[in-house]
Amino acid sequence: MAATSDTFNASSGGDVIFRSSDGVLFFVHKDALGYCSGGFPDGDAITVDPEPVPLTESSSVLEILFQFVYPRKQPALDDMKFSLFLAVAEAAEKYEVYFAMNICQLRMKEYLPAQASAIFGFAGKHNYPYLIAAASPLLIGKPLTEIARVLPPHLFVPWVSLVFVD
């Protein structure tokens, strides 16, 4: 029998079942997904299927992300390892979980300057200009190979032009 989320289990009444990349099942209400996200179809368009929908995110990421689709106190994202925080932020963007998207992009600055490169890449990928502006000065002088690994291609040429101004 597959492992099930402590929070989003069969007794929670969720009518859509998701399976994390590490095999944990999450029972989530289709109406909540439809109201609070743009990456999942609205509640009327989701058909209830007894087969779990596989997702690429780990159970630790989904446990946090799905809390944002319900009208209740949102999870605190402070004191979280940056790798988990970034994975939650990426999942929020991928599935357009609006409340999570907002809180993640606001909290990103708390990880500066230590995670400037990753934040710069995230901000460029998801079009958060104020995060780009906050991280940019911390990256002046970094090797271009490091910047090229994190910055989306459409922003790389402007970055090089900015850094190597005559």
Image: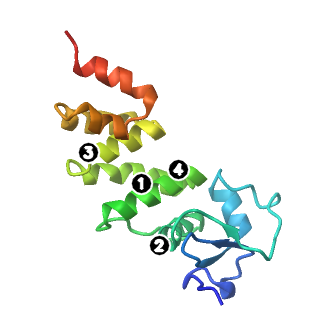
Query: Label 4, label 1: how many angstroms apart (C-alpha)?
Result: 9 Å
Q: N-terminal of the two: label 4 or label 2?
A: 2
Counting from the top left corner in percent of width and height, residue 150 is at: 36, 40
In the rendered image, the residue lying farthest to the left is 141
Query: Label 2, on which residue?
Result: 60
Query: Label 4, label 2: how many angstroms apart (C-alpha)?
Result: 16 Å
Q: N-terminal of the two: label 4 or label 1?
A: 4
* Residue 104, disc: 1
Question: In this view of the protein, can residue 142 be seen by the observer?
Answer: yes
Mark toward the viewer: 4 or 1: 4
Q: N-terminal of the two: label 3 or label 4?
A: 4
The number of discs equals: 4
Q: N-terminal of the two: label 2 or label 3?
A: 2
Mark toward the viewer: 3 or 1: 3
Q: Looking at the rendering, in which quadrant would you find the C terminus?
A: top left
In the rendered image, the residue lying farthest to the bottom is 1
Neighbour tally class for label 3: few under 14, some 14-19, many 20 plus, Cα within 10 Å: many
Q: Secondary structure at mark 3?
A: helix
Q: Looking at the rendering, in which quadrant would you find the N terminus?
A: bottom right
Q: Is residue 139 above or below residue 58?
A: above
- Identify which residue is drawn at 32% across, 67% down: 80
Whether pointer 4 and pointer 1 mark residues with C-beta atoms closer than 8 Å, the reply is no
Q: Is residue 152 above or below residue 73?
A: above
Query: Label 3, label 4: how many angstroms apart (C-alpha)?
Result: 19 Å
Query: Label 3, label 1: how many angstroms apart (C-alpha)?
Result: 15 Å
Query: Label 3, on which residue?
Result: 116
Query: Label 4, on which residue?
Result: 93
Nearer-the-camera pick, 22 or 11: 22
Neighbour tally class for label 4: few under 14, some 14-19, many 20 plus, Cα within 10 Å: many
